[in-house]
């Protein structure tokens, strides 16, 4: 696996490290935990909205069970999309915003 280069301090680190050995910037491969949570939440919300919208258009009574199922489907779709677009590229995050 290729070495990775920190954009902040230009230090080369081995692929797989969790922090930059030069400046202690956090290294994340692909999406951060935060982003995953955010996308999943939006998937659930999106699924809920689409389900309510769709049910009212086709004239089926909106029930908690159906909305719940729709939210789950939205969450699953967003999880699949996340895996699909997660290229595993290293990204560097500095804890201190002074640079
Ligand atoms: Zn660095």
Image (cartoon, grey):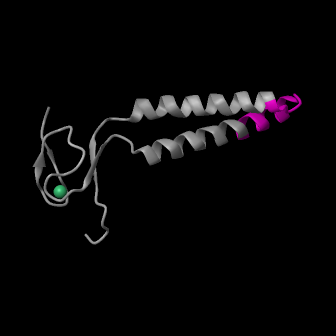
Ligand 1 sits in which quadrant? bottom left
Name the quadrant of the N terminus.
top left
Magenta stretch, main secondary structure, is helix
Is residue 56 magenta-colored?
Answer: yes
**Quadrant location of residue 16?**
top left
The foreground one among 57 and 40 is: 40
Image check: 21 left or right of 49?
left
Query: What segment carries the magenta color?
Result: 49-64
Query: In this image, 8 relative to 69: left or right?
Result: left
Membership of 81 in magenta stretch: no
In the picture provided, is 12 more to the left or to the right than 26? left
Question: Which residue is located at x 71 percent, y 27 percent?
Answer: 69
Residue 10 quadrant? bottom left
Q: Is residue 30 above or below residue 11?
A: above
The image quarter containing residue 73 is top right
Q: Quadrant of the C terminus?
A: bottom left
Residue 43, percent from left and from top: 59, 38
Q: Position of residue 81 (x, y in %)?
A: 48, 32
- Number of numbered discs present? 0
Measuring 68% from the left and 34% from the top, which residue is drawn there? 71
Up the image or down, 75 lies above or below 12; here it is above
Given the current orientation, which residue lies at the most extreme bottom position? 98
Left or right of 18 in this view: 2: left
């Amino acid at each position: 696996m290729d070495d990775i280069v920190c954009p902040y301090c230009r230090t080369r680190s081995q692929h797989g490290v969790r922090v930059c050995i030069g400046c202690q910037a956090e290294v994340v491969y692909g999406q951060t935990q935060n982003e995953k949570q955010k996308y999943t939440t939006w998937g659930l919300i999106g699924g809920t909205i689409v389900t309510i919208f769709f049910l009212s258009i086709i004239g089926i009574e909106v029930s908690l069970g159906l909305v719940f199922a729709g939210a789950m489907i939205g969450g699953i779709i967003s999880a699949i999309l996340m895996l699909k677009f997660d290229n595993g590229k290293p990204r560097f995050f500095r804890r201190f915003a002074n640079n």
